[in-house]
Amino acid sequence: MHFSLVSAIGFFLFGATLTVTARPDNAAAILQDLQRRVEAKLHETNKTAPGSPPGHGGQTCTLANAAVRKDCVIYRLGTDVLLGRVPASALPSVDPDFSAAQNHFDDFVAVHMNQTNFIHGTANFLTWHRYLIWLWEQKLRNYCGYTGYLPYWNWFKYQDDLSKSPVFDGSDTSLGGDGEYFAHNGSVVGAGRVWLPSGEGGGCVKSGPFVGYTINIGPVQPAMQGYTPVFTDVKHLNPRCQRRDLTTAASTSTFTAANLLNLTMGPASATVGHFQDELQGPYGTLRIHGAGHYAMGGDGSDVFTSLNDPAFYLHHAMVDRLYWIWQLLHPDEARKVNGTVTFRNNPPSREGTVDDLLDVGKLGPAVPIRDVLDTLGGSPLCYIYV
Ligand SMILES: *[C@@H]1O[C@H](CO)[C@@H](O)[C@H](O)[C@H]1NC(C)=O
Ligand SMILES: *[C@@H]1O[C@H](CO)[C@@H](O)[C@H](O)[C@H]1NC(C)=O
Ligand SMILES: *[C@@H]1O[C@H](CO)[C@@H](O)[C@H](O)[C@H]1NC(C)=O
Ligand SMILES: *[C@@H]1O[C@H](CO)[C@@H](O)[C@H](O)[C@H]1NC(C)=O
Ligand SMILES: *[C@@H]1O[C@H](CO)[C@@H](O)[C@H](O)[C@H]1NC(C)=O
Ligand SMILES: [Cu+2]
């Protein structure tokens, strides 16, 4: 049976033309519906980005040859190529200035840490992270024998019991399970205004492919209480286990139909400024982007070095997927940016533009924002989500 959501979410809609045929309380079904809607749009245009330069391999990027990123529920990583472990063990660090980085996995952590104040709450937040995870996907494929594409963590499944999620269930194809029990009083987030009670972990990840794996950089500012930050920079080596505290309080409260609808069709979808600000959360609130990090707890809860938890890449793939859906639903806004070049404009700085370069240090070439606005632009990006 199909419900028309128009009346239920009428206040979200600007025109009455959008109809979502899913129960209003079922975020996963709403997301499916949005997915079908944007796929239909893509197929209408059979997007080849007219005028765009050829993508990799000299081919123009089309729907037919685009990479397809999938839900990790249906597309697990495969035990032969363990996301993160292969590059970590196989690839050396490429930046001697990041002397704490012991391998290429750490390089990603270091680059993100060094730029934290210039890539969050900024005009480049969505595109910088889009480019970073694309580079990660390329490394896995080009150097680690990985033949798939980056899967995403579908927030709208298992949000009421993260330990059952294929991302975190502790199986060989997950990114590891919960941490060992570590007594602590939850996490303080949202500029100190939101308290999340602890889960059942908090210590070293105790199951899955990354047990015994060493991380080296940070923590700088973990939200999890009792996890003491070290004074740290990209030269401070701090070898330790990766910690996690699966925090369902973060996911269940935030990965909701109301938040999804607001961001894709409601007031928060109206402009790129509204979209990115609501996604990251107005000052003192917890919203979807932060909730993914705090749902991981431990290392994943550290805004500077959350990449130490390999689930970072699957979380940001989902952030990117939401951005992609939003872009396809809002073509007039899709190529705009909003905001300045410093974290919540602190210290005050100039407005960002689509000509600003996305600086990823030695991870890859700096590219202008305009080149990654379209995931089918072909140079460098050529992918879709299903
Ligand atoms: C899109 O165009 C390509 C050729 O550029 C074609 O191979 C493909 O089947 C088309 N896809 C759709 C969905 O129409
Ligand atoms: C850190 O980032 C700044 C720019 O934000 C850059 O000038 C500096 O070289 C980076 N540090 C390292 C060690 O790469
Ligand atoms: C845990 O922290 C919260 C928020 O700071 C506080 O309200 C609560 O009393 C604390 N509980 C314990 C047992 O310290
Ligand atoms: C939707 O987003 C707008 C801002 O873009 C915000 O003011 C409003 O509180 C959000 N609504 C809900 C229900 O979260
Ligand atoms: C950026 O977006 C916000 C809404 O989130 C809006 O108030 C502001 O005017 C926008 N700034 C520019 C320069 O467009
Ligand atoms: Cu980040």
Image: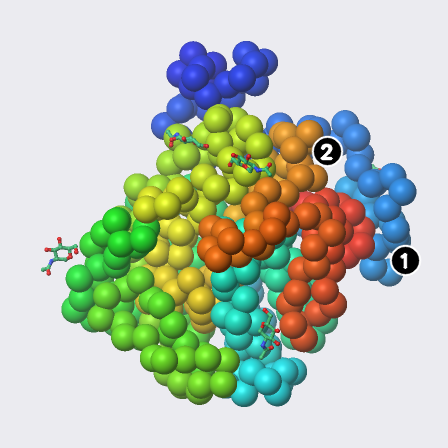
146 relative to 153 in the view: left or right: right
Q: Secondary structure at mark 1?
A: helix
Q: Amino acid at mark 2?
A: Leu
Q: Residues within 10 Å of mark 2 (few under 14, many from 20)?
A: some
Q: Position of residue 201 (x, y in %)?
A: 25, 65
60 relative to 246 in the view: left or right: right
Q: What is the distance, in whole Å, between disc 2 and disc 1 at their CAs?
A: 22 Å
Q: Amino acid at mark 1?
A: Gly
Q: Secondary structure at mark 2?
A: helix
Residue picked out by circle 2? 42
Closer-to-camera residue (210/355): 355
Q: Exactly how many numbered labels are in the figure?
A: 2
Residue picked out by circle 1? 58
Residue displayed at 86% across by 46% down: 52
253 relative to 347 in the view: left or right: left
Closer-to-camera residue (147/237): 237
Residue displayed at 17% across by 62% down: 185
Counting residues from the start of the chain, the first of labels 2 and 1 encountered is 2
In the rendered view, would you say 102 is above or below 182? below
